[in-house]
Amino acid sequence: MIEINKSIDHIISCLSGYDPDSMSVSGALDIILELTQDHCESLGSEFVPLTDAPGRILYNDLISTLDVPAQDNAAMDGYAFAHKSLEKKNETAKLKIRGSISAGEIISDEIFQGECVKIMTGAKMPDMCDTVVPQEFVSISDGMACFESSIVKEGDNRRKKGEDLKFGNPVLQRGRLLSAADVGLVASLGIPEIGVYKKLRVGYFSTGNELKSPGQELNEGCIYDSNRYTMSAMLNRLPVDVIDFGVVVDNHRILESAFKNAASKVDLIVTSGGVSVGESDFTKQVMKSLGSVEFWKIAMRPGRPMAVGTIKKPNEVGSKHTIVFGLPGNPVAVMVTFFIFVLPAIRRMVGNIRYLNRKLKFPLITSINKKKGRTEFRRGNLVSVNGNIFVKVQENQGSGILSSMSEADCLVILEHDEQTYKAGDKVSVLIFDGLQESGE
């Protein structure tokens, strides 16, 4: 189990001007990142086969155990020879063909000046050979390879020993989210399994008497719970083990039992609903009674209300707690607050050194006005105009309109202190594709 040395109460006690009713997005994120700092150290590590490594976080720096390639080899199919065999640059070279070499084979015969050997991509370069002429530039006549000497320079089309990876040099840094290319790189060193951080355990549930799960009969006044399924989809793309605790009704005893049960099984709890002004106070009361939880009004749209903190693990002594995020109930607000706050927190908790969201800049296709003093996250789409990429903000920005989130491919960030954006102004954009896997 993860041990948390800092409570949110301790963190905010060190802040000047802290006001939970007027939190900036950056201020809220700073507190969250401090709360989740160093949690990965308690996760421990495990070895996994390379087939299971993509998407996991590297536990230790990886140092090259050999040179890759292990010897000079041919970069393409052609004819290997010593470049000094070419007497004049603008004449046709004619080299005697001594045989052929495929990848995985070697040739024991010495290749002398004025000779060459047919060679396949990846085959070891024979001694004395330093250049490969591509086969498409060569014609064969009476056992001689003929080509214009000016088409190749010394060393062309030869991969040098250790050109990709050098023995003893760093290959991958601890805390890296392993990609398909990374796994291939590890395999090229002959390593069959790799040490990664153990997975974080995350539980989630929705709160509300009006919620029904898909497949249940929908009574009058009720709605189907979409938030649990969007949270599940977002979490399952991360290096975490996920537990769905279902729908919890607005009842103090049942909510308390649900939080205690979840806290006993996971390192992080994410809930939706029950934290907005005017909603049932049960969720807030239970969170507050079980630990150190702050309820924020964040200067953002959508997603203004949010709860964050820690609750004590049942039957545990010392400082063992579970971090909890209480997200709003509106479907779009759930996704936005998850992307902006929960996602960087999870990345940091699992040991990913690139835990901040990666923002790109694109020009707006139309002008936009917003309220100064809050950060807005508007759904948008990237569009191509005359070969240039612009971002177009969708018209319907209601926090309950999940269809617009489905149609969008990015979030457009309109900054806290800005009020007017003109067409062509560059704005920060979070692109959904790849957003969850890694940050910067």
Image (tube, rainbow, N blue to C red):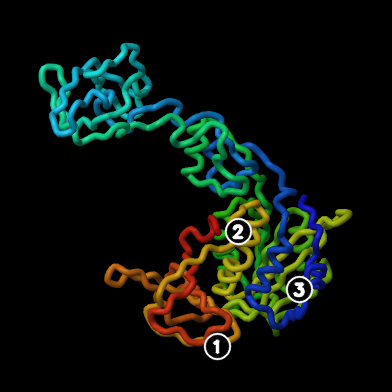
Amino acid type for the residue under numbered disc 2: Tyr
Helix, strand or loop under label 1 = loop
Is the residue under label 3 in contact with that under label 1 (CB below 8 Å)?
Answer: no
Q: Nearer the viewer, residue 286 or 80?
A: 80
Badge 3 local density, few (<14 within 10 Å), some, or many (20+)?
Answer: many
* Residue of label 1: 371
First reached walking from the N terminus: tag 1 or tag 3:
3
- Can see residue 287? no
The x, y position of residue 207, in whole percent, is 68, 70
* Residue of label 3: 294
Q: Is 417 rendered above or below residue 272?
A: below
The residue positioned farthest toward the top in the image shown: 109
Q: CA distance from mark 3 to mark 2?
A: 23 Å
Residue at the spot 24% in from the left edge and 25% down from the top edge: 79
Camera-near label (1 vs 3) is 1
Q: CA distance from mark 1 to mark 3?
A: 26 Å
The residue positioned farthest toward the right in the image shown: 317
Q: Looking at the rendering, which quadrant does residue 92 occupy?
A: top left
Q: CA distance from mark 2 to mark 1?
A: 29 Å
Badge 1 local density, few (<14 within 10 Å), some, or many (20+)?
Answer: some
Q: Looking at the rendering, which quadrant does residue 220 occupy?
A: bottom right
* Residue of label 2: 355
Helix, strand or loop under label 2 = loop
Badge 2 local density, few (<14 within 10 Å), some, or many (20+)?
Answer: many
